């Protein structure tokens, strides 16, 4: 279901059980480990390493989300203020910089959600076990 995919993508949880974490380090500030993912889910053992180079496709999602954020801020400014002042461009750039690591992780989660689907039975087993 769509709500499971949305939750999994933005909460950065396993798309199969919605319990396990997708990333080794939950901190968005440690840039050395920002994209480190375990080999599989700690809860349901879903493989996160689908194939070599699998997450390269997430770059397209990351680019799209970044553009939506940037043009969204600029578009709102254009509608509300009827112009785009320099300070709004600065705000958009700062928003992009601060959200860059989260966007990277969300794009990986979205890409994984295209291939892996929620499994009610496995999720029930994870809750019980």
Image (cartoon, grey):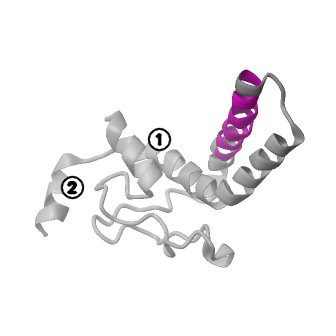
Q: Residues within 10 Å of mark 1 (few under 14, many from 20)?
A: few
Element on which disc 1 rests = helix
Query: Which residue is at the front of the view, 17 or 96?
Result: 96
The answer to whether 82 is drawn above or below residue 21 in the figure is above
Q: Answer yes or no: do the residues labelled 2 and 1 have beta carbons within 8 Å? A: no
Q: Position of residue 45 (x, y in %)?
A: 32, 66
| Residue of label 1 | 114
Q: Is residue 45 left or right of residue 65?
A: left
Q: Earlier in the sequence, mark 2 or mark 1?
A: 1
Say whether residue 120 is magenta: no
Tell me which residue sits at (59%, 58%) in the image: 102
Which residue is most to the left? 128
**Residue range corresponding to the magenta coloring:** 62-79
Say whether residue 74 is magenta: yes
Q: Main secondary structure of the magenta part?
A: helix
Quadrant for residue 84, please give it.
top right
Q: Is residue 42 left or right of residue 52?
A: left
Query: Which residue is at the front of the view, 1 or 70?
Result: 70
Q: Position of residue 82 (x, y in %)?
A: 79, 22
Which residue is most to the front? 81
Q: Which mark is residue 123?
A: 2
Tell me which residue sits at (34%, 65%) in the image: 20
Q: Is residue 107 left or right of residue 69?
A: left
Q: Which mark is residue 59?
A: none
Q: Position of residue 58 (x, y in %)?
A: 62, 48
Q: Residues within 10 Å of mark 2 (few under 14, many from 20)?
A: some
Image quarter where the N terminus lies is: top left
Q: Position of residue 43 (x, y in %)?
A: 28, 68
Element on which disc 2 rests = helix
Query: Which residue is at the front of the view, 12 or 88?
Result: 88
Image quarter where the C terminus lies is: bottom left
Query: Which residue is at the front of the view, 122 or 93?
Result: 93
């Amino acid at each position: 279901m769509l709500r499971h995919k949305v939750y999994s993508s933005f909460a950065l949880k396993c798309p199969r059980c919605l319990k396990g974490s997708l990333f080794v380090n939950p901190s968005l500030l440690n840039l050395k480990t920002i994209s480190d993912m375990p080999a599989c889910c700690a809860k349901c053992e879903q493989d996160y390493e689908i194939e070599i180079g699998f997450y390269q496709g997430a770059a397209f999602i990351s680019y799209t989300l970044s553009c939506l954020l940037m043009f969204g801020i600029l578009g709102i400014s254009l509608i509300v203020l009827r112009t785009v002042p320099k300070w709004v461009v600065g705000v958009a750039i700062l928003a992009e910089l601060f959200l860059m690591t989260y966007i990277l992780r969300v794009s990986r989660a979205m890409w994984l959600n295209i291939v892996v689907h929620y499994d009610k039975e496995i999720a029930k087993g994870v809750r019980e076990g």
